[in-house]
Image (tube, rainbow, N blue to C red):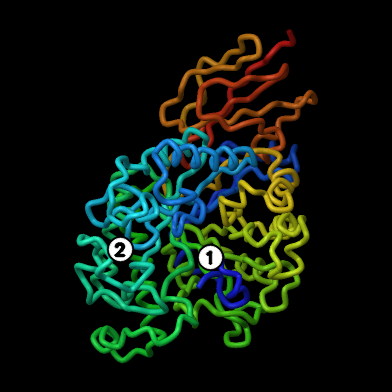
Amino acid sequence: MTTSAAYVFGPGATESPAATKKTTTTAPATATAEATAACKPDARYPKRQLRGVWIATVKNIDWPSRAGLGQARQKAEYVKILDSAVKRNLNAVFVQVRPASDAIYRSSLEPWSQYLTGTAGKDPGWDPLPFLIDEAHKRNLEFHAWFNPYRAAEGTDLSKLPANHPARQHRDWTVKYGGGLYYNPGLPQVREHVTKVITDVVSRYDIDGVHFDDYFYPYPGGGGTFDDKAAFAKYGKGQKLADWRRENVNKLVAKVDEAVHETKNHVKFGISPFGIWRNESNDPDGSATAGMSAYDSIYADARAWIKAGTVDYVAPQLYWPRGFKAADYKALTSWWAGAVKGTGVQLYIGQALYQVGTRTNAAWANPGELSAHLTVNRRYKEVDGDIYFSAKQLLTNPLGAIDRVAKEHYSRPALLPIMEDRGGEAPDRPAGAKASGSTVSWTPSQGARAYAVYRVPESGKDCHTTDARNLAAVVTGTSYQAKPGTYLITSLDRQHHESTPVKVKVDKG
């Protein structure tokens, strides 16, 4: 995702069936026609918007900063990332829990990741995942567990893998390519294993989402040929090789989608594909671009997933600036907005925070380029948010770009976009709300994950159902330190369905 050498071609090495399955609600059920008429929505303060950051563990890109750190240091580094996210009013983290058929959590199916201790298979002495999830939830950050489905190992020497590593136990599952080891997507056993690993995490941990990034079949340029001839001969059934490979990926996506929701319906499933589906030069339905095509090069057909409704969201990696001829940010945002339109599949844009301040393109020397991307997004009601790669740059804040994004676009918190198919309902409104001095408090509502606090302006004009202009905070506790004024408190479930408000007045002095 971060290699700039493949900047242009790859980041690293009418109603559809989905419309009947996926339902998106952008306004809470409590909204009324009267409120909408009274308050014109202000695009600067969206009521609902996903604001996420990727936290990569592979090669210790983001966390832990290096292998072998003690538990206390690992915890401190993670909390620092979360606090940096909260400071910018982000509301979701996408944490890589399975970098390469290994585990950042205690697993009976795959060995401990080398990125924790420095030694693959070595027990770090604690299970990090409950801590990672709990700390995110304490800060009102949705936690998405990020899995790489097909990467089996960084090297090709099977003897260096732990004895219980699936690639070592099932050598026939693997293909060596470009100095790495991959699971063969054409094998039903591989699909079964990947789904089993993911289902295990969904069933045992309180995650909010399952996430794939852009790695499916390996990116071209690694040298040699991806040798799946035997699997193709056995399972190809007269198809063209490229079509068969795309179908293999589609089968895994559909299988994971079904397994995740059968295990826990509220858990979301989404994918962050490479930013170009196809170019219009080789497909009239493609985008006005001239870069690598995910459909043709890595056999990832995001448009098929959207149409089939086998994803809840897509987060295409639009890692190029505005005006870049081969892959113009504006052209791609428009294309993806059109791809999800009418399907109910939500669209978040993958933003290249890691590119800011680099020399891959002169535009990245502009500290306002990233913020300008979000301004472009406002043109499309289909864009439900953004995810930033990656957490390391969230901390270093290159050129002050992420602070500028926060100032110009995230000056208010935002609730999460609702996915009706993931269930849930608005909890009861907070009871026992009262003010004591500057402290507003209330009793917990059953089913509430958090509470939204709105400060009504002196004019008395209540716009809380329209946008977030008056949203002061989203808190997980049952109190809030308030300035004098009138406040509305609502309850939110884990999907951010919102209750009707209760009003509290805080007097001066």
Rendered-image quadrant of the C terminus? top right
Say which mark, if any, is on residue 194. 2
Q: Position of residue 196 (x, y in %)?
A: 26, 59
Viewer-nearest of discs 1 and 2:
1
Q: Residue at x 23, y 86 (%)?
A: 234
Q: Quadrant of residue 7?
A: bottom right
What residue lies at 56% left-to-right and 74% top-to-bottom? Answer: 10
- Residues at marks 1 and 2, CA–CA distance in whole angstroms: 21 Å
Question: Residue at 43% across / 68% down in the picture?
Answer: 308
- Name the residue that disc number 1 marks: 1
Q: Secondary structure at mark 2?
A: helix
Under mark 1, the amino acid is: Met
In the image, which disc is placed on residue 436?
A: none
Mark 2 Cα shell of 10 Å, populated few (<14), some (14-19), many (≥20): many
Which comes before the other along the chain, label 1 or label 2?
A: 1
486 sits left or right of 155 in the view: right
Residue closer to the observer: 19 or 286 = 286
Residue 421 is at least partly visible in this image: no
- Residue 385 drawn above or below residue 124: below
Is 17 placed above or below 204 here? below
